Amino acid sequence: MRRLLQEFFTPLVLLGGMLLACLAFSGLLAGLVFLRPQPAPLALGTAALNVIPAPTATRLLPTLPPSPTPSPTPPLPGLAPLAVNDYVQVAGTGADGLRLRADPGLNGNVLYLAIDAEVFKIIDGPRDVDGYTWWYLLEPYKQNIKGWAVANYLALIQNP
């Protein structure tokens, strides 16, 4: 059996087999290259850009220098007297805002700048310092916002 194989697989037969395998492989590659489907043309689209403004946060102002001493402002007309546990709304500050301070008085560090229409609960007071009546306010939904504020810019809310 071995001899039969040696007679059949002569060097000429082996060389012919390799040549035939190379031709078959070349034909396969040529078929893949020339018969492949053409890619679809790229469609040009229109780019859409949506600009979304970033949210702004209310700034805490712990390092503001003390405000110059303003002349005492009379309370807003029609404001009711205030008491502890009342809910009040900041009113009449214009664009200046109402400073909530660490201590009653104009020399207290500013902790927060409240804008008109913000609502607070009165926790303590009144204290008469620097010619103003001061109330200790607490923001009902954000317990970290609190401080002493001048009564001149607080309006009582009847039904909170």
Image (tube, grey):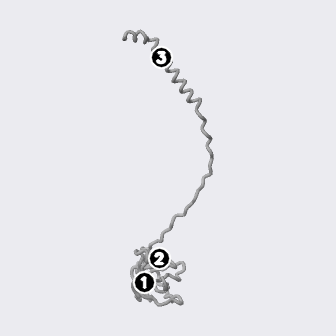
Tag nearer the camera, 3 or 2: 3
* Location of residue 157 with respect to 27 vertically, above or below: below
Q: Which residue is mark 2?
A: 113
Q: Determine the CA span between mark 3 and mark 1.
A: 101 Å
Q: Nearer the viewer, residue 142 or 55?
A: 142
**Mark with earlier residue (3, 1):** 3
Marker disc for residue 122: 1
Q: Determine the CA span between mark 3 and mark 2.
A: 92 Å
Q: Are marks 3 and 1 in contact (CB under 8 Å)?
A: no
Q: Determine the CA span between mark 1 and mark 2.
A: 16 Å
* Location of residue 14 with respect to 52 vertically, above or below: above
What residue is rendered at 60% in x and 38% in y? 39
**Mark with earlier residue (3, 2):** 3
* Type of amino acid under label 3: Gly
Tag nearer the camera, 1 or 2: 1
Where does residue 5 sit, x and y in percent of width and height? 40, 12
* Type of amino acid under label 1: Ile
* Location of residue 53 with respect to 65 vertically, above or below: above
Q: Which residue is mark 3?
A: 17
Q: Secondary structure at mark 3?
A: helix
Label 1: few (<14), some or many (≥20) within 10 Å? many
User: Is residue 109 found left or right of 117 in the rendered image?
Assistant: left
What residue is rendered at 62% in x and 41% in y? 41
The residue at the far front in this view is: 1
Q: Which image quarter is the N terminus in?
A: top left
Q: Are marks 1 and 2 in contact (CB under 8 Å)?
A: no
Q: Secondary structure at mark 2?
A: strand
Where does residue 113 sit, x and y in percent of width and height? 47, 76
**Mark with earlier residue (1, 2):** 2
* Type of amino acid under label 2: Leu
